[in-house]
Amino acid sequence: MARIAYLECTKCGQRLTADRPQTICPTDGGVLYVRYDLAKLKQGFKPASLAGCISTMWRYAEVLPDAQPISLGEGFTPMFPSREFPNVYIKDEGLNPTGSFKARGLSAAVTMAKAYGLEKLAIPSAGNAAGALAAYAAVGGIEAYIFMPKDAPIANRIESENYGAHVTLVGGLISDCARMVAERKDKEGWFDVSTFKEPFRVEGKKTMGYEVAEQLHWRLPQGIIYPTGGGVGLIGMWKAFEEMDQLGWIAPERPKMVCVQSTGCAPIVKAWDDGSSTSQIWGNASTIAAGLRVPKSYGDYIILDILHKSGGTAVAVTDEEIMDALHHWAQVEGLFAAPEGAAALAAYRKLRSNGFFGPDDAVVLFNTGTGLKYLDVIEGQTKSANPKLAASRYLGGIIGPY
């Protein structure tokens, strides 16, 4: 595995040591990136080196932190061609352990927590991140403290409890959960592994970028459509493309990165349309896709910069469009997607109709989780005469430092 050279702030460029646990940049609060000596790795690490490697995200160990992996077999999920649209591929992250792409980031974060000797990890979550942390913490012999809204999807609460995590149900939003973690972590001895609070969840998520390239024989697609709440996956993939370029594995061309959000919570889309470099807090966030119910991402400035650099865009879709896409994927592709994942299909439909993507463009759509984690939500939407989610299911909040 790669020896970490240093951690780098994405705002000011300050370099920090990785010899001890780090959170965010102490100078300006910027998100930290893990950096390796890629020039040295380039000499002996080639795509051919992957032949015979384990079929998990840890096949890319040379560009992951040098620690014994805490793994459940996450990553290297299938990417299959759409039956409906030529040149479209669907990357199914619902086949990860705990049923979502969150397994990648939490595998990496818990791996490093174990390497650092941390004993207690805490996270605010409205869903899949909670279950993923609980599972990997159980494997690593680390205590997990999870704070989630009382009206979080029942599957996430049940799995977290069964993995042995300490689950606290909060009468409020995910931002209230995050505030509780921030207020108690020092006293309780918890290390906060919230989105962007530590640098290794990005490292786990970046492996999606390596896989897309490998599964397309080291030729990147013209576009990637990614459901975006916190945006760690989109940011991680862009980091992966930069690394592969430096390693000499891919050409300089990049996919058009597309952020898709719900019309009920679309801070990145609004910022993009307004030409802003950061987003504003989205009031009264409401959508059936819990993972998209993030009124402000702490990494918004990185996401918007990626959209600009890639020639991409940001698209908002309605809950009605999400549910139609969810049912359509199930019946046409045999894929039971999470609502967040179905949003990618809804976005692609819009981008094909307005000419942003043409029929010859290779485009990858990400399904970020399995629909089996959302049975209560999907059944409620299917039976309800009112397509809008009841106000009691608002789970919005800000993921970021407090």
Image (spheres, helix red, strand yellow):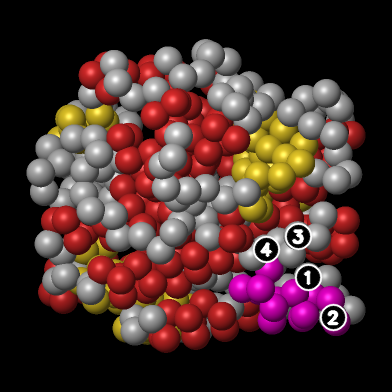
Classify 230 as above or below 377: above
In this figure, which residue is indicated by the disc labeled 1?
Answer: 388
Mark in the foreground, 1 or 3: 3
> What distance separates the C-alpha of mark 3 from that of mark 4?
10 Å
Residue 28 appears in view: no
> What distance separates the C-alpha of mark 1 from that of mark 2?
9 Å
Question: Is residue 318 located in the magenta-colored stretch of the structure?
Answer: no
Residue at point 41%, 42% (across, down): 53
Residue at point 88%, 56% (across, down): 332
Q: Which residues are magenta?
A: 371-383
User: Residue 138: where, in percent of width, then height?
Assistant: 31, 75
- Mark 1: few/some/many CA within 10 Å (<14, 14-19, 20+): some
What kind of element bears circle 3?
loop
> Mark 1: which amino acid?
Lys
> Mark 4: which amino acid?
Ala
- Mark 2: few/some/many CA within 10 Å (<14, 14-19, 20+): few
Residue sitting at the far front: 52
> Mark 2: which amino acid?
Ser
- Mark 4: few/some/many CA within 10 Å (<14, 14-19, 20+): many
> Mark 3: which amino acid?
Leu
Answer whether labels 4 and 2 touch (C-beta < 8 Å): no
In this figure, which residue is indicated by the disc labeled 4?
Answer: 338
> What distance separates the C-alpha of mark 4 from that of mark 1?
17 Å
Answer whether labels 1 and 3 touch (C-beta < 8 Å): no
In this figure, which residue is indicated by the disc labeled 2?
Answer: 384
Quarter in which the N terminus is drawn: top left
Most frequent secondary structure within the magenta stretch: helix
Q: Earlier in the sequence, mark 1 or mark 3?
A: 3
> What distance separates the C-alpha of mark 1 from that of mark 3?
24 Å
Mark in the foreground, 3 or 4: 3
